[in-house]
Amino acid sequence: MTRAANRLMRHGLEGRHLRSIRLAANREVDLFRQLTGPLLRHPSPANLRQAAEVLADVAQAARELQETMVREDLRTLLEA
């Protein structure tokens, strides 16, 4: 995380910008928590295993979606 933050700061981003990235990540985790809330409220080994699988899957899907959206927006920016 430190290495990525330093790379962003070398390009001119400041702490306040990094905070907005952190807040977006927190909102994403809150959304994922809603998906697994029922499983986590009754933390049996089976429920925890299922919650971990759901979280891994939605986190991966969200990363892919976010990467695609950013790539498309950057392409539009460069074409303008």
Image (cartoon, helix red, strand yellow):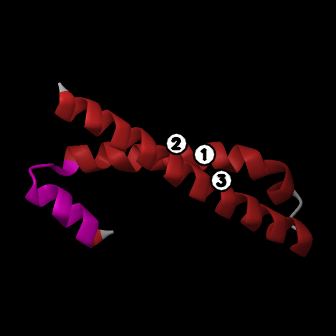
Q: Residue at x 65, y 48 (%)?
A: 32
Tag 1 secondary structure: helix
Q: How many marks?
A: 3
Q: Is residue 15 above or below residue 79?
A: below
Tell whether label 2 touches label 1 (CB within 8 Å): yes
Task: Measuring from the top left, give residue 66's x and y in whole percent.
Answer: 46, 45
Main SS of the magenta part reads helix
Reading the image, the residue beneath label 1 is: 30
First in sequence, mark 3 or 2: give its number.
2
The reply to whether the magenta stretch includes residue 51 is: no
**Mark 2 highlights which residue?**
27
Which percent across, then down, holds residue 30?
A: 60, 45
**Rendered-image quadrant of the N terminus:** bottom left
Mark 2: few, some, or many residues within 10 Å (few <14, many ≥20)? few
Looking at marks 3 and 1 on the same chain, the residue that comes earlier in the sequence is marked by: 1
Q: Of circles 3 and 2, which is in front?
A: 3
Could you say which quadrant of the image residue 24 lies in?
top left
Residue type (three-letter) at the residue carrying disc 3: Val
In the figure, 32 relative to 69: above or below?
below
Q: Any magenta on residue 12?
A: yes
